[in-house]
Amino acid sequence: MNYQPEEELKRRLQELEADMNSFSSKSNENGAQQQPKEFKFAKFNSLLERSKTWFQGLSGVKKLVATGVVILLALWVLQTVFKLVTSVISLALLSGLVYLGYKFFISNSFQRKQ
C-alpha cells in the first residue's frame, strides 16, 4: 500500500527537479545577456518611467500637491543624512578627546605611581 504513494512522491520530485533545471537554464540565458547592474538600472528606469506617466496624468492641483510631497520627503531625507553625518563626526571627535584624556591624565598618573 505504501508503494504507490512513494512512487507518486518520486515522480513529483522528478517533475520539480526538471522544472528547476529548465528555470535555471532560462535564467542563465538571460543572465548572459544582461548584467546584474544593468538589470537593476532597467528596473529603476522602468519605475521612473511609470512615475513620469503617473505624474503627467494628474491634474494641475494634484501635480502641485505631489511636487510638494516629494520636496518635503527629499528635505526630510537630506536632513536625516546631515544628522547622521553630524553624529558620526561628533562621535569621532568625542572618541578622540576621550583617547587624549586617557593618554594625558590616566597614563601619566599611572606612570608616576610606578
Image: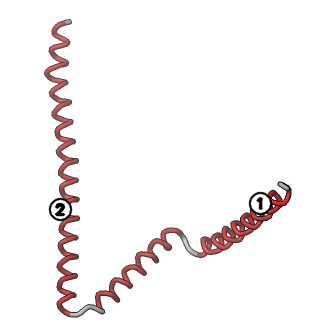
> Does the residue at mark 2 contact the one at mark 1 (Cβ under 8 Å)?
no
Residue type beneath disc 2? Gln
Which residue is more in the foreground, 75 or 32? 75
Q: Which secondary structure lies at badge 2?
A: helix
x then y, percent, for residue 86: 18, 51
Q: Residue 41: horizontal and vertical position, in percent?
A: 44, 74
Query: Quadrant location of residue 57?
Result: bottom left
Seen in the picture, residue 89 relative to 111 is either above or below; the reply is below
Mark 1 Cα within 10 Å, few/some/many (few <14, many 20+)? few
Marker disc for residue 89: none
Residue 64 in the image: x percent, y percent?
17, 86
Q: Which residue does the image show at 66% across and 73% down from the upper left? A: 26
Image point (20%, 30%), residue name? 99
Picture quadrant of residue 1: bottom right
Pick out the residue farthest to the front.
Answer: 1
Circle 1 is placed at which residue position?
A: 9
The image shows residue 86, relative to residue 74, as above or below, that is above
Residue at left offset 81%, top offset 57%? 6
**Label 1 is placed on what type of residue?**
Leu
Q: Is 13 left, or right, of 55 in this rendering? A: right
Q: Quadrant of residue 108?
A: top left
Image quarter where the C terminus lies is top left
Q: Point out the tag, 2 or 1, that comes first from the N-terminus.
A: 1
> What percent of the width, then of the height, locates residue 18?
75, 67
Distance Cα–Cα, label 2 vs label 1:
58 Å
Outermost residue, top side: 114
Q: Which mark is residue 79?
A: 2
Judge from the rendering whether residue 42 lies leftward or rightward of residue 65; answer left or right: right
Q: Label 2 neighbourhood size at 10 Å, few (<14), some (14-19), many (20+)?
A: few
Q: Secondary structure at mark 1?
A: helix
